[in-house]
Image: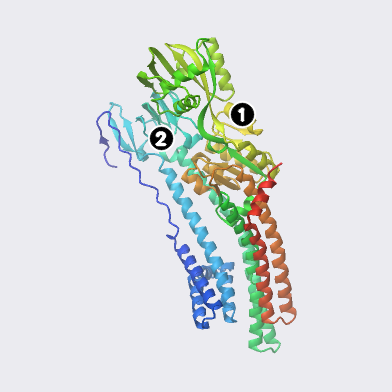
Amino acid sequence: MAAPILVPHRTAPAVVRAPVRRTRLFALPEMRWAAASLVLFLLGLVAQLAGAPSWSWWGLYLACYAAGGWEPGLAGLRALREKTLDVDLLMVVAAIGAAGIGQITDGALLIVIFATSGALEALATARTEDSVRGLLDLAPETATRVDSDGFEVAVAVADLEVGDLLLVRPGERIAADATVIGGGSEVDQATITGEPLPVDKTAGDEVFAGTLNGTGTLRIRVDRRARDSVVARIAALVEQAAGTKARTQLFIEKVEQRYSLGMVAVTIAVFVIPLLAGDSVQRALLRAMTFMIVASPCAVVLATMPPLLAAVANAGRHGVLAKSAVVMEHLGSVDRVVFDKTGTLTRGTPELAEIHSLEPAFTEDEILRLAAAVEHPSEHPLAAAVVRAARARGLELPAVDEFTAHPGRGVSALVTGQRVGVGSPASLSAGRGDLDATVANMQARGYTAVVVTCDARPTGVLALSDQPRPEAETAVTAAARVTGGPPVLLTGDNSATAGRLARQLGITDIRADLLPEGKVEAIRALQAEGAKIAMVGDGINDAPALATADSGIAMGGAGSDLTLQTADAVVVRDDLTTVPAVIALSRRARRVVVANLIIAATFIGILVLWDLFGTLPLPLGVAGHEGSTVIVGLNGLRLLRDAAWKRAVRTGRP
C-alpha cells in the first residue's frame, strides 16, 4: 500500500468523485438489434401494402428475421445443448415455419415482439446496476485522518479502520459511519434517514457515511469500515431484493418448458401420423405448418401486451411512468399502499407553523421580525423558513451587525442595539418554566422548536414543520378506497412528527424512527401477513424498501437517481393523486387481459381442434388466427383513451 500523504494543518483533502456512468439507450446490443428488426419490419410492411415486387418485401422481412431472431435463436440452441427447450426458440421456429408456408409477415411480427421485450429487460438491468454504483459514490474517496501525534493525513476511505480519528470540515461529506467526539455542526442526513432538516450533532452523536456536514467542524471516531457502512448496506439491499424478484419467474419458465415440449410433440405428430397413414408429404407438411400457425401464441401475446402497454402509455400522459407492462400488471394486485413521509406526503421543506411569545412586550410580528433579521445572512434551511414567513407577513427587516454563526446551536447578531439570538433550545440552560413547557409542548406535537432571545432573555419560540402536500389527504383516502386496505406511513423521522402528520391525513398505521433496514423489515412484515405492497418514496433511503415492495413508486420531482432507477414506476409531476389512479387503471387493464385471454384461448382451441380432427383450410386458419389477434389487440387499445384515465380517477373518489 502506498505511503500516506502528509498535508499541512487546515488543508482539506481533495475529494474527487468520477461522475456515474449511465448506460445509454442504444449502448446495449440487444436494443440496437431490436430497433433494427422493428425498422426492417415496418419497411417490409410498407413495401407489401404498396404493391412492391414480392422479392423486395420478402428480403426486408428476412433481414428482420436475422436482426431480431439471431440472438434468441442462438440462446435457444445453447439451451438445447443443456437439454432444455424454451419458448424463444419455439417462436423462432414458428416464425421460420410461417415463412415456409408463405406467412412471413406473421413470423416477422413475432420476431419483433420478442426482440423488443428482451432489449427492454436488458436496459432495465443495466440502468439499475449503474444506479447502485452511483449510490456507493456518495461517500468521498478520501478522508482526513488525525494521527496520534496530531498530524492530518489524507487517506483512502477504503483504508480506514474502526477506531480511526477523522476531521470533517464545513461542507465536506462524512467518510464513514462514526461517533462525534469533538466539535459541533448540523448534518444533512436526508440520504440515509429521510429527515427533511439538518440534524445538530455534538459529542456522542452518531453520523453516517455519505451525509453532508454543515457549517461546523467535527472530529469523529470511525465505527464501521466502508464495506459495512449504512450506505453500502443500502446498495446491497437493493441488489438482494432485485434478485429475489427475479426468482419469481421460475414458475413462468416451467410453463414455457411444458408448452414448448407439448407444441413440438404435437406438431411432429401432426406431420408423421398422416404420413404413416399414407398421406402425401406435401399435405402432411401443410397440416403441420397450419397447426404451427394456429397454435402460435401471437394472439395470447397480444391479449396481454396491448392492454398493459396502452395503460402504460395512458398513465405516462398523465404523469406516471410505469417502466414495463409487467409493472403495470403488478400494480393491479396491490392491496396496501405504504407512504414515505418527507418529500412524499410532505413538501420536504420547513415552514413556520406557530409563534409563541414569552414576554408581553414582544408581539408575534416583533418576534418574527427580529428572528428573520438575524437569520437572513444564514444558509440554514430553518433560517430560510423564518425569512419566508416574515416576508409573507410584509415585515420590514432591520439591518444587523456582528452576525455570528454558532454551529450546532444557532446564530446571533446585533439588531437595533440588542443582541438577538435564534437557536436550538438545547443551547439554553434548563429550568425556565414557561420556556421549557412551551418547547416540550411543541416537540410533543411534532414541531421543531426554535428559541428567540434578546440580550440572553428568551422572548419567543417558533414552531417549524414540514408541511403536507395539498393533495396528500385526498391521495391517502383514494389509495385506501382503491386497494381496500389501510395505508401505512414509514419514516425515519421521530414518532411525534410522524404522528402529527398521520392524524392530519387519516393514517392509523405508523412506523417511525426507521433506518433503511427498518423500512425493509416493515415491508417484509406486511408481506408476511399476505399483503401485496406498493411503496411510495423519494429518497435514497427509500430505495431498498422500493425494491423489496411488490411495486415501488418514486416521486420524480426530488427523487434521487437510485430511487428513480430502483422504482417500478415514477410520479413525474409529484402529484400524489395519480398513485391511486394508476393502481385503478392497472386493475382495469388486468380485467381486459383476462377477457382477451379467454377470447384468444377460444379461437386457438377451436382452430387447433379443427386442424387435428378435421381439415382446416390454411386461409381459414390464418384468417381465424389473425382475426383473433386483431380482436384482442383492438380491445386492449381501448385503454389508450383519456376516458380510461378519468374513470380510474373517479374510482378512487368517494
Q: Residue 69's x, y, as percent?
A: 51, 71
Quadrant for the N terminus in the image: top left
The foreground one among 117 and 422 is 422
* Residue 499 tag number: 1
Q: Earlier in the sequence, mark 2 or mark 1?
A: 2
- The correct choice, above or below, for 126 with respect to 42 in the image is above
* Residue 176 tag number: 2
The foreground one among 268 and 392 is 392
Q: Residue 84's x, y, as percent?
A: 57, 67
Q: Amino acid at mark 2?
A: Ala
Instruction: Determine the residue positioned at 55% across, 73% down.
Output: 108
Residue 449 lies left or right of residue 586; in this view the side is left
Residue 583 lies left or right of residue 210; in this view the side is right
- The secondary element bearing badge 1 is classed as helix
Label 2 crowd bin: few (<14), some (14–19), many (20+), radius 10 Å: many
* Residue 637 tag number: none
- Visible residue check, residue 195: no
The foreground one among 12 and 310 is 310
Q: Amino acid at mark 1?
A: Gly
